Amino acid sequence: MKILYVVNTYADENNPAAEPFVKAQIDSIRETGVDVKVFNVRGSDSKLNYFKGVIEVCSLVRQEPFDLVHGHYSYSGWIAALQAKVPSVVSFMGSDLLGSCMGIGSTILRGKLDSALSILLTHFVDGIIVKSDEMARRISKKNSLAIIPNGIDFYTFKPLPRKECRRKIGLGIEYPVVLFVGRKASINKGYALVRKAVGLVTQDVHCKLLVVQGVPHQDMPLYMNASDVLVLASQYEGSPNVVKEALACNLSVVTTDVGDVREVLTGISGCKIVRRNPKSIAKGIQAVFNAELPCNGRKVIQHLQQERIAERIVHFYHTIIEERRKSRL
């Protein structure tokens, strides 16, 4: 089987933090024995690259015997679909299908447009992959739909000695550490809420807020194992990888009820789902600090190992290819 992946951006030595979960998934598919080629649209460089991408991908598909084209994110999904020669699959990431949000509950115009284009795209592709039940409910075309979250690299994300991790990143061991992963400027990620929540917590227990963004993906386990709790205060998510990566490190999580986190956290101790306000987040952090049982996330989320997810995706490819073949008989 030969698969062409179309991606908006791709992690490399010049940009190691660019959508690392996409590269990780593609690498895991390659390790199953599938012949893989990646077309990087470089959409962040210029939106015109998406239009050029349609022509370039059509040319690639004519030149090489691909069995399927898989687009990650809706814009790349359109490029995958428009080549038309071989079956196409799109993976929706979350904001593309659900719409980007700003403020409390308001969807910005760009988010509404992205969501509408994503829904329209479902009628042009042969297969659809979403990350959660919430995303699946937005799609009416159920017969070619698969709910497959991103897998986690259990070899990279694993428990490590906290004292040693703190030493490596320059942190002392005196106080508990609250980890926030993401851009401070992102309204969706809720940094301001987390900062206020930590301020409330420090009235009773002195702790430190550690903000991490833009670090190489392979370094994230250091920060996770140096911390006592990860806080996710997002307004919307598809299936947040950072939560699953933290759980693979047995790091407790305090999170808003977004995407599939409620399902993922089922049966896991030392974690809390909270409302999206500083007081509720602070109570969640305090509950984790006072928890009797440590986080047992790694044991519970074994089904999310990268290798197992890769097997599910490859099986889905075979199904889509066979359905296209039958439709042409």
Image: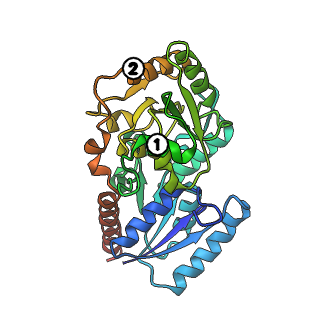
Quadrant for residue 310, please give it. Answer: bottom left
The percent position of residue 273, horizontal first and vertical second, equals 40, 26
**Disc 2 and disc 1 in contact, CB within 8 angstroms:** no
Residue type, label 2: Ala
The percent position of residue 100, horizontal first and vertical second, equals 60, 39
Which label's residue is closer to the chain start, 2 or 1? 1
Q: Is residue 97 above or below residue 195?
A: below
User: Relative to residue 52, is residue 8 drawn left or right?
Assistant: left
Q: Depth check: 275 or 168 in front?
A: 168
Q: Considering the numbered disc 2 on the image, is that residue within a helix, a strand or a loop?
A: helix
User: Relative to residue 35, is residue 51 drawn left or right?
Assistant: right
Image quadrant holding the C terminus, namely bottom left
Residue 124 can be seen in this image: no
Taking the view exactly as shown, the residue that stands out farthest to the top is: 203
Q: Depth check: 176 or 131 in front?
A: 176
Residue type, label 1: Met
The percent position of residue 207, horizontal first and vertical second, equals 53, 24
The percent position of residue 287, horizontal first and vertical second, equals 39, 20
Q: Depth check: 31 or 312 in front?
A: 31
Distance from disc 2 to disc 1, alpha carbons, whole Å, reads 19 Å
Q: Is residue 200 above or below residue 162?
A: above
Report which residue position mark 1 lands on: 224
Q: Which disc, if any, is residue 153?
A: none
Report which residue position mark 2 lands on: 287
